[in-house]
Image (cartoon, grey):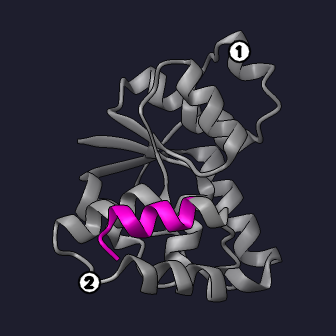
């Protein structure tokens, strides 16, 4: 499987030392240059991401040369726009993105969308983690990751927790 990751998915999992789950669950993870730029900027400017190094095993590609009008005019940040565009350009199996607007735009464009929650649930199913709840707690406490309570409850129920 080949997936394209957005900035927040990489940074939040890296913040809790579990970025490798992306590779373990999804296989090949690729990002556009814009995501690397955002990750580096946020690791310098956001204390919670302070000093995080971009995972060396994630493959980096040039930002897509062209993007669809729906994508360009959607109000997304550069990383989200480039990640969705790269997913289309490379015909990847999914885009890993958590922001509501980015998820909605990707879905409207017919892309399979997976976020951190879906990744954690699959990681548990595959035996890579024992508890979704424990990692969601760490994401909240250490990375400042916010999840709608209703979605958190559904995720835990789906994970059998």
Nearer to me, 118 or 35 = 118
| Residue lying furthest top | 69
Please tell me which residue is depicted at 69% across the width and 69% down the height of the picture: 146
Q: Residue at x 72, y 84 (%)?
A: 48
Identify the residue under disc 1: 70
60 above or below 66?
below
Circles 2 and 1 in contact, beta carbons < 8 Å: no
**Pointer 2: residues within 10 angstroms few (<14), some, or many (20+)?**
few
Task: From the image, state whether disc 2 or disc 1 is nearer to you.
Answer: 2
Q: Position of residue 95 (x, y in %)?
A: 46, 39
Quadrant, the C terminus: bottom left
Q: Position of residue 10 (x, y in %)?
A: 52, 63
Q: Earlier in the sequence, mark 2 or mark 1?
A: 1
User: To which quarter of the image does residue 108 belong?
Assistant: top right
Where disc 1 sits, the SS reads: helix
Report how many numbered discs are placed on residues in the image.
2
Q: Give the CA distance from mark 2 to mark 1.
A: 40 Å
Q: Please indicate, yes or no, whether residue 56 appears anywhere in the rendered image.
A: no
Q: Main secondary structure of the magenta part?
A: helix
Q: Quarter of the image containing the N terminus?
A: top left
Q: Please identify the quarter of the rendering in which residue 7 is found.
A: bottom right
66 sits left or right of 20 in the view: right
User: Is 14 on the left-hand or right-hand side of 124?
Assistant: right
Establish if 1 lies above or below 54.
Answer: above
Q: For the magenta stretch, what is the residue range?
A: 151-161
Mark 2 highlights which residue?
Answer: 130
Residue at (35% x, 31% y) in the render:
92
């Amino acid at each position: 499987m080949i997936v394209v990751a957005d900035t927040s998915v990489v940074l939040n999992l890296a913040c809790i030392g579990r970025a490798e789950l992306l590779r373990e669950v999804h296989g090949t993870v690729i990002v556009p240059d814009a995501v690397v730029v955002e990750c580096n900027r946020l690791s310098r400017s956001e204390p919670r991401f302070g000093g995080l190094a971009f995972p060396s095993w994630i493959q980096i590609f040039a930002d897509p040369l062209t993007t669809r009008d729906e994508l360009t005019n959607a109000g997304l940040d550069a990383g989200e726009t480039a990640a969705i565009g790269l997913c289309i350009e490379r015909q990847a199996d999914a885009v890993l993105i958590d922001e509501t607007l980015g998820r909605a735009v990707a879905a409207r464009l017919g892309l399979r969308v997976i976020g951190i929650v879906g990744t954690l649930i699959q990681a548990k199913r595959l035996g890579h983690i024992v508890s979704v709840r424990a990692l969601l707690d760490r994401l909240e406490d250490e990375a400042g990751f916010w999840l709608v309570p209703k979605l958190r409850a559904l995720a835990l129920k789906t994970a059998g927790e």
